[in-house]
Image: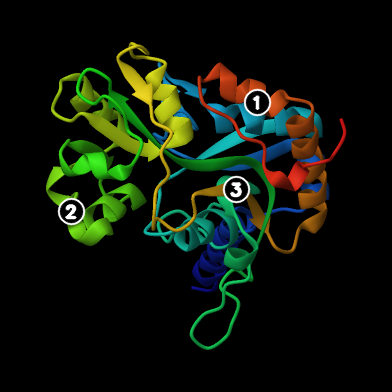
Amino acid sequence: MKNNILNALILCLSCCSIICSTAFARSYDDIIESKEITVAVYRDYAPFSYQEDGKEKGIDIEVAKHIAKELGVKLHIKWATADEDVEGDLRNNIWKGHYLERTIADLMLRIPYDQAYSNLRDDIGEPVHEQVHMFAPYHTESWKIIFNKTKIDDVSTMAVFQYHNIGVEVDSIPQFYLLSVFNGRMASKTKQFPSLPLAISAMQSQKVDAVMGLRSQISHYQAQLDSQTYVLANNAFPMIGKQQWDIGMAIKSDYRQLGYAIGDIVQAMVVQGTMKNIFTQYNAIYQMPDYYAGIEE
């Protein structure tokens, strides 16, 4: 009986040890000593992070590879499934872990870099992001429209989409924007698709005349089309809120030394042109964040 209890206790402690070893992010020293870093990226999110023929590809994959190389460690990718919001993504991948899989990463890419968002507080005044540190902006994102030149002469304003169908991804900001802006005048012309690639395919089959999405994604998919027929618009987006925003990274708030090391690597990538070259490799438009303005190579 005593042996059974002892064995059960040992098993329990062993399981706890395994769980604890995978449930906590690691310090810079731990990462260097283990010679491995785990980086979380979103799955099925071209051109940022996806798999093709069993190989990891994408802008964020290349960024993660470069960071690992500069740190002198092996890269391990953690594929993240998007939650309902960024708070859920950070909780599941950086500081707590998903309830079905308690493993977390040392670093997560493609996180909003915004001081107001970082300092956000809940209903009782507590910091929402106390567990994470968001840092190292590596590109500036915005919205973009691609349209069929044979169907629309020009997209100088959004008003044209009172008369032409436009595709958007379901549950995206472009969807909410087009359904509600200008008293819903574009709602009937807004066609919703499960993903941006499907919206692009619908444009190719002439089910819609244009598609709205992230600039880097839209430019990536344009490279696969006839650029004389499918062109990028240069219009603004009235009443959409932010016209552009920075994308950065996140680590657990306890490990600032890791953040400093990665921040230096990212800064060098940006100012030396390595980051732009990675975006060019995937035919995505790159914009340097203002954070690095005036910094010399």
Instruction: Please name the amino acid that badge 1 sits on.
Output: Lys
Residue at the image point whose x is 26% and y is 24% from the top: 153
Rendered-image quadrant of the C terminus: top right
Compared to residue 247, the image places residue 53 above or below, namely above
**Which residue is identified by label 3?**
246
Give residue 8's position: percent from left, percent from top: 51, 66
Instruction: Please name the amino acid that badge 3 sits on.
Output: Asp
Residue 288, by quadrant, is top right
Marks 2 and 1: in contact by CB < 8 Å?
A: no
Give residue 227's position: percent from left, percent from top: 37, 13
Instruction: Please name the amino acid that badge 2 sits on.
Output: Arg
* Numbered label attached to residue 8: none
Sooner in the amino-acid sequence: mark 1 or mark 2: 2
- Specify few, some or many for label 1: CA neighbours under 10 Å numbering under 14, 14-19, or 20 or more: some
- Does dot 3 land on a helix, a strand or a loop? strand
Compared to residue 8, the image places residue 251 above or below, namely above
Q: Observer-nearest residue: 32 or 272?
A: 272
As measured in the structure, the alpha-carbon distance from the residue carrying label 1 to the one carrying label 3 is: 15 Å
* Numbered label attached to residue 185: 2
As measured in the structure, the alpha-carbon distance from the residue carrying label 1 to the one carrying label 2 is: 38 Å
- Specify few, some or many for label 2: CA neighbours under 10 Å numbering under 14, 14-19, or 20 or more: some
Specify whether 285 is left or right of 51.
right
* Numbered label attached to residue 276: 1
Can residue 193 be seen in the rendering of this structure? no
Residue at the image point whose x is 36% and y is 36% from the top: 156
Sooner in the amino-acid sequence: mark 1 or mark 3: 3
Q: Observer-nearest residue: 94 or 188?
A: 188
Can residue 235 be seen in the rendering of this structure? yes
Which of the two discs, 1 and 2, sits closer to the camera?
2
